[in-house]
Image (cartoon, rainbow, N blue to C red):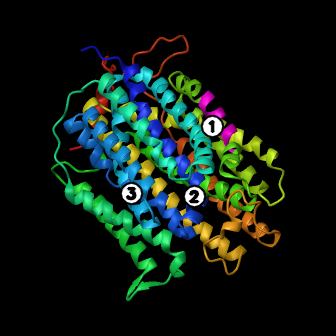
Amino acid sequence: MERKPWPALWALVIGFFMILVDSTIVSIANPAILTDLDTDFTAVLWVTSAYLLAYAVPLLITGRLGDRFGPKRIYLIGLVIFTLASLWCGFAGDITMLIVARAVQGLGAALMTPQTMAVITRIFPPNQRGAAMGLWGAVAGIATLVGPILGGVLVDTLGWEWIFFVNVPVGIVAFAMAVWLVPNLETHPHRFDWLGVVLSGVGMFLVVFGIQEGESYDWGTIVGPISVWGLIITGVVVLAGFLVWQRFNRAEPLLPLGLFRDRNFALSNVAISLVGLAITSMPLPLAFYFQIARGLDPTQAALMLAPMAVASGIMAPIIGKLTDRVDPKWVALAGFSTVAVALGWMALWLSPDAELWTLLFPVALLGLGLSGIWAPLASSATRNLPPQQAGAGSGVYNMTRQVGSVLGSAAITALLNARLAAELPGFTGGFSGEAGAGSGGLPPQLAEGFATAMSQSLWLPVIGFGLGAIVVLFFAKPKVTVAWGGQRPADASGSADAAGGAPAEASASRSE
């Protein structure tokens, strides 16, 4: 059967689109969930953290599952789990049930995401992967526009439950398209490192729980001899044990450290983890600022972010094609730097009486910068991967992104709580209905402190993107490039596989 890469990619990005829309919808709906379920600030942020944690931990093994049983089959299983979990989220009657359902949703997303990148790596030749990743980035930009606006309309009209119900028809369409258009690719046998799964999962949970809940316990004792810092340190030790086990596991490690011998793969993973941290911590201060400090309703708050999505959606495919023709390092450097400047501009500008229209300029600049990040990083990470390591490599890449997202969610929760406690002494983490979204904003005596806390918290993603700019400076020049005239020069050290593989010497990146 002839492989048609572009129709297959379009089918897969429908599911990818649904995952991203779901994330952005939840960000804009957090204030409504907070008041409707009568919960507190920290608990409502666990709706996001539980999803991200369940998303991140299995990614290493779900990439291998795609290699072992076929990426199409695993993608479809994940899509079914994600769609059914969306129904569960919509019917959740309390915050605990919603958090549990979101965790199951995250598991479905973990099964889906590595398969998308693995299919791109295996059916697109290296000189077309930048364009394919550009489409991937364009979908991300469109999702950031559709998600908040659709979420705002649904929350304002039908209620927050419908931000999850809307996934059901999209999931059905995505399933039908994937069955029809995605090819069945050859499989590769793998052993599964269950001890690695346990160590990575336990370590991540302890670190994330400690960071996110630290402020709730005043960074002291949780129960008996167990302290917040004890949990965090134990989690770090367990994660260190996980890395040691991966180094000495002679069967087949969960984390193939040999992949990191490729310099750009290693640096791309560092950079994408910083993107995950920053991109997850960015929307929460903005959503709470617009809806609580300024009293906008969810739709109005979403429209404030529309220039970002429009700019990103327009520029992402252009940037994707550009990364096939020039050194991706310079594109990524420009993207990271632009985003850091835009967010710093916004952090300095947030106040209770700032003219809202003036914030549209840095928001648009933010979208322009984001369009220059996704494709260069993804193409740099996957360019030299051999086909039999596509699932493992994409699993590692997506895992590091999600680990960054988990840590970003935990860190922004701790930072928001700390800054609110400092700027609004006596703050308890909850808001009455009178101070919720669309109510006209907080009273003047509270609005100043609340806006200041949101502004200070926004410096976390600024630092994340700034560090990303430094990391990409150390990228090596790609071994396989495409000249401006469209001719692909042969690499002196090895020819590229016509079927979409990597240069021959990339086999040095294979794990033992």
Question: Which residue is the site of mark 3?
Answer: 101
State left or right for residue 247 relative to residue 219: left
- Mark 3 or 1 closer to N-term? 3
> Is the residue 124 above or below the residue 350 in the image?
above
How far is the residue under mark 3 from the one under mark 2?
16 Å
Amino acid on which disc 2 is placed: Asn
Q: Position of residue 185 (x, y in %)?
A: 24, 27
Q: Nearer the viewer, mark 3 or mark 1?
A: 3
Q: Quadrant of residue 452?
A: bottom right
Taking depth in this image into account, of 163 and 205 the one nearest to the observer is: 163
Evaluate whether residue 176 shows in this view.
Answer: yes
Question: Which residue is the site of mark 2?
Answer: 30
Question: Which residue is the site of mark 1?
Answer: 309
- Mark 1 secondary-structure assignment: helix
- Mark 3 secondary-structure assignment: helix
- Mark 3 or 2 closer to N-term? 2
Give the residues drawn in magenta, as a range: 305-315
Answer whether residue 307 is magenta in the image: yes
